[in-house]
Image (cartoon, coloured by chain):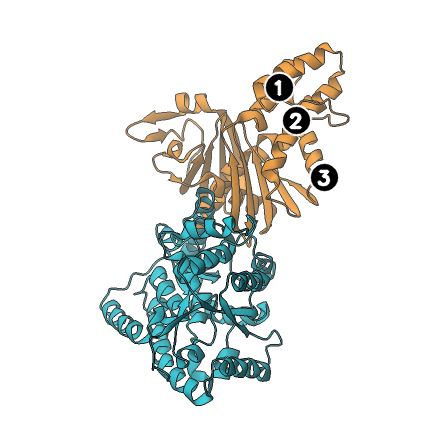
Chain colours: A orange, B cyan
Amino acid sequence: MCMRTLGIDLGSREVKIAVMEDGRIVNKSRVSTMTFYREYCSFDGKILVDLSKLEIDKIDKAVSTGYGRNNTDLRMFKAINEIKAHVYGGIYQTGLKDFILLDIGGQDVKVVRVEKGIITDLDLNEKCAASCGRYLENMANVLEIPLNSMSDYYDNPVELNSTCAVFSESELIGKIAEGINIKRLCAGVNYSLYKRLKPLMSNFKGKDLIVTGGVATNKAVKHYLERDYENIISVDGPQFNGAIGCCYYGESFL
Amino acid sequence: MKEDNILKKIGLTTTVPVEVLIAAGYRPVDLNNLFITSDDYSKYIETAERDGFPKSLCAWIKGIYGACVENGIKEIVGVIEGDCSNTKALAEVLELRGIKVYPFSFPQSHRKEDVEVEIKKFMDIFHVSYEEVEVVRKKLNRIRKLAGELDRLTYAHDKVSGFENHLYQVSLSDFNGDADEFEKELETFILKVKKRDETCKKVRLGYIGVPPMTIDIYDFVERFDASFVYNEVQREFAFPRCEDASNIYEQYYDYTYPYDVNYRIKEIKKQIEDRRIDGIVHYTQAFCYRAVENIILKDKLNVPIINIEGDKMNSLDARTKLRLEAFLDMLGDLKEVSCV
């Protein structure tokens, strides 16, 4: 009999689900947050997740994490702190015990220092979305270009100086009107996100940086981060890092 | 012992051979304790800054200065070697303010002969003999032994909280100004705690570094099922190995705080083992060179270690609380596994 552990990360944009079987991830899936609550959950004092609808069965342990601890109160699930979930995900996926972890999600950014496998420092930006994935989505919409394509460009970025994500949109439109080419506009958007991350990262200097969350797929942002760290470490399915961390936690500690 | 007149107060900036001062008829007052236990602690810092101490300077130095000036302390012992260079400059400023400063050094060579030379110089300054000092030492060692018992009740029997352990041991730097009274207080406290039930916490922590400005750290960690079972420097102030020393020179040789970090680490490692410590909180004061030593401590100690920094506030800030919470949370996970 193998041990099956379910991990769920309730993000602001998507719910990420992972299943671990004896230390190996065997299943990963995503659903939009709204769909998850509407289609797969019912409520009887606590939220009950319908695993059969998710086509998941034979689960021995279930662990959840998410955006704000109160949102993770699922029946039958052990809820854990999201920062810890991401750190365990990082440890499981890289085998490292000493690193800086940068998780850029849809609406928040976390940066964590891990030493000897334990969190020793952390900082969060959950008050402003201008350094998060949602900002990139909006800007890609303005440029009418797929998000993935936008992330390819990093050379010669056009300067975007607004602190605010909304003002940045107007600034970008101004640059479009100036006739600046799309590559420089894309690079400018990516670079403006990196510039906003810089102050947050200033207390988190180190050698190895693990990048997770949706924005970890952004080539340009990682390119800029290479200036500040010796090694930028990517993981498979960076959006699933929190859910995988939940599985790892469940298998190791429950 | 010279008890012919009312005891004169003498301020201390750190632990020094207090036996010499008591033998000379002084009442030692640890200025650190005077500063931090006062409701006016921030006023003391303010006094120092008004007198020209920079913003970017250790709050202990400024607090000691304020406490000294505001409480009318006329004489102090200035440790000119073995403590930081800021203390040295502090002593010079106090001298400028008309305060009599008696020098003492913990020689950086850390050789027994050199320690002996320094203590002899100290005894000469205060005109006391070796024999007089030894009489005081034996008396104080009785109290130091009691502190050792209190420490054991902390880590071996879980009957004393981390804060109590801190408070009593740190008080041994000046015996709260009255050794007899302090001895009684300590005896009564020990009798009381022996009757307590053991309160075992899941995570056993060690506190290393200078005593905290942020004294609420002791209560804070207990909210996460953790407690401090080791207070490194406070324990050193209490001289836990005093009974192994055959004289005052040996006693102040076998002392880690003012000497090099590797000597300190040897003792810390032993205590991590003996006390089954799961993780270390290394407290450093903002702008202090000891934060640099964290690089070595982190490397040499084989348990997780978190470096937190205090400045002028006497309570933990929200960010430090968040960091400690995350650290303790993960230590708790590891403990869960090792308990199985």
Residue B47 percent location from the top left of the image: 46, 51
Sequence-wise first label, 3 or 1:
1
Residue at (28% x, 73% y) in the render: B181
Q: CA distance from mark 1 to mark 2?
A: 9 Å
| 3 and 2 marks in contact (CB < 8 Å) | no
Q: Quadrant of residue A140?
A: top right
Residue positioned 30% across, 76% down in the render: B180
Q: Could you tell me the amino acid type at mark 2?
A: Ser
Same chain for labels 1 and 2? Say yes or no: yes
Alpha-carbon neighbours of circle 2 within 10 Å: few (<14), some, or many (≥20)? many
To which residue does mark 2 refer?
A: A192
Q: Which chain does tag 2 point to?
A: A
Q: Residue at x 43, y 84 (%)?
A: B133
Which of pointers 1 and 2 lies earlier in the amino acid sequence?
A: 1
Depicted B292 relative to depicted A148: above or below: below
Tag in front: 3 or 1: 1
- State the residue in front, B7 or A153: B7
Instruction: Check if mark 1's residue and mark 2's residue have beta carbons within 8 Å.
Output: yes
What amino acid type should be assigned to the residue bearing mark 3?
A: Arg
x and y, in percent, of residue A70 in the image: 37, 33
Callout 3 and callout 2 share a chain: yes
Looking at the rendered structure, the number of numbered marks drawn on it comes to 3
Q: Earlier in the sequence, mark 3 or mark 2?
A: 2
For disc 3, the chain is A
Q: Which residue position holds label 1?
A: A168
A125 left or right of B133 in image: right
Q: Residue furthest top?
A: A177
Spatial separation of the CA atoms under disc 3 and disc 1: 24 Å
Task: Give residue A40's position: percent from left, percent from top.
Answer: 40, 25
Secondary structure state at the residue bearing disc 2? helix
**Label 1's element?**
helix
